[in-house]
Image (cartoon, rainbow, N blue to C red):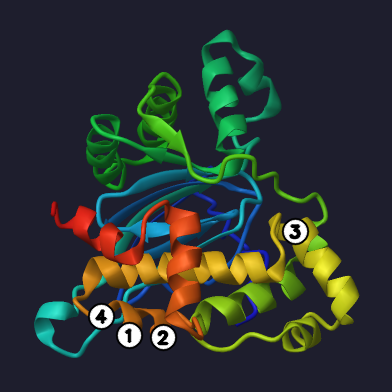
């Protein structure tokens, strides 16, 4: 898995990229692009990775991602039974920060949108009732053309800019200015970790993936992610364990093993430190016990 900078297609008949994806699984791995992205997951569930953040996503979610903010949607496993093979569906609008021209953002009427796009540098998740309203408008956006479609997109952004029903996804994350040149090695490592959440991880192996020595890799990884390799892997495994606690009835011991923890005592300790409760209590809260 070697995702890096995604090249967003330029369309001659439209100033921004708009697509309606319907696939068995979302196919873009860990990647970034200079374009702003408004992403509406119509259908699917899994784990979403944005900047430093990892959390569950499900159908209906809408997020706004700033320029060069790394992201990745990892779908839950798809089983062969017909009732479990609903496609991954999304409506995605991507546009350059200057797609309407620099002078456009200097107009008094567009200042709020400009501030919104700056806030989106760490990602924003839309909350109801804003989310439900924007979802309807994004569906309608697919049916429009020309200037009506463009002004509708601007209207959507203006509504988001004027609403308090948004929350940051990865607070404090700042896209690295060297990301475009360094993304390949980081993407290779993070993609490897995401695909093998429960597998053993060794520093020499990760350093080799990045084509660096261990000491240089540790400094590089911390500068790019804000975490040590151990912290990142533990965080990733705790998130995965939360997912298993939410979706399955497997025992705490089994979940600990699947998430890659060598002993259950350390798993419970690490889980409590991250989530504030034990795995058992976390599951009880989810079920209203």
The answer to whether 202 is drawn above or below residue 58 in the figure is below
Separation of marks 4 and 2 at Cα, in angstroms: 10 Å
- Please identify, in this view, whether the residue under mark 3 or under mark 1 is nearer the observer: 1
Residue beneath disc 3 = 224
Residue that appears at 19% across and 73% down: 86
Contact, CB < 8 Å: mark 1 with mark 2?
Answer: yes
**Tag 1, which secondary structure?**
helix
Viewer-proximal residue among 10 and 198:
198
Residue that appears at 55% across and 46% down: 170
Quadrant in which residue 7 is drawn:
bottom right
Separation of marks 3 and 1 at Cα, in angstroms: 32 Å
Q: Position of residue 176 (x, y in %)?
A: 76, 51
182 displayed left or right of 191: right
Separation of marks 2 and 3 at Cα, in angstroms: 29 Å
Separation of marks 1 and 2 at Cα, in angstroms: 5 Å
Q: Position of residue 192 (x, y in %)?
A: 60, 82
Q: Callout 1: 10 Å neighbours few (<14), some, many (20+)?
A: few
Where residue 257 is drawn, which disc sits there? 2
Contact, CB < 8 Å: mark 4 with mark 1?
Answer: yes
* Of the image marks 4 and 3, the number of the one nearer the N terminus: 3
Q: Callout 4: 10 Å neighbours few (<14), some, many (20+)?
A: few
**Tag 4, which secondary structure?**
loop
Residue that appears at 31% across and 81% down: 77
**Tag 3, which secondary structure?**
helix
Where residue 251 is drawn, which disc sits there? 4
Residue beneath disc 1 = 254
Viewer-proximal residue among 173 and 256:
256
3 displayed left or right of 16: right
Q: Position of residue 228 (x, y in %)?
A: 72, 64
* Of the image marks 2 and 3, the number of the one nearer the N terminus: 3
Task: Please indicate, yes or no, whether residue 12 appears anywhere in the rendered image.
Answer: yes
């Amino acid at each position: 898995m070697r995702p890096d900078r995604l090249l967003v297609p330029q369309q001659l008949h439209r100033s921004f990229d708009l697509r309606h994806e319907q696939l068995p699984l979302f196919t873009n791995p860990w990647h970034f692009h200079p374009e702003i992205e408004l992403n509406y997951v119509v259908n699917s569930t899994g784990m979403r990775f944005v900047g430093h953040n990892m959390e569950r996503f499900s159908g209906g979610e809408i997020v706004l991602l700033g320029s060069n903010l790394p992201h990745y949607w990892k779908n839950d496993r798809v089983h062969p039974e017909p009732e479990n093979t609903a496609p991954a569906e999304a409506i995605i609008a991507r546009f350059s920060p200057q797609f309407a021209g620099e002078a456009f953002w200097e107009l008094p009427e567009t200042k709020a949108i400009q501030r919104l796009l700056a806030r989106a540098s760490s990602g924003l998740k839309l909350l109801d009732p804003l989310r439900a309203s924007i979802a309807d408008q994004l569906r309608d956006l697919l049916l429009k053309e020309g200037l009506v479609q463009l002004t509708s997109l601007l209207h959507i952004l203006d509504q988001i800019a004027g609403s308090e029903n948004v929350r940051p996804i990865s607070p404090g994350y700042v896209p690295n200015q060297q990301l475009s040149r360094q993304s390949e090695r980081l993407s290779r490592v993070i993609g490897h970790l995401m695909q093998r959440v429960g597998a053993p991880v060794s520093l020499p192996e990760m350093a080799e993936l990045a084509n660096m020595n261990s000491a240089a890799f540790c400094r590089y990884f911390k500068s790019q992610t804000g975490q040590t390799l151990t912290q990142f892997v533990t965080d990733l495994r705790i998130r995965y364990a939360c997912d298993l606690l939410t979706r399955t009835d497997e025992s705490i011991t089994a979940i600990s093993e699947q998430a890659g923890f060598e002993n259950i005592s350390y798993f419970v300790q690490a889980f409590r430190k991250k989530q504030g409760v034990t795995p058992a209590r976390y599951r009880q809260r989810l079920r209203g016990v």
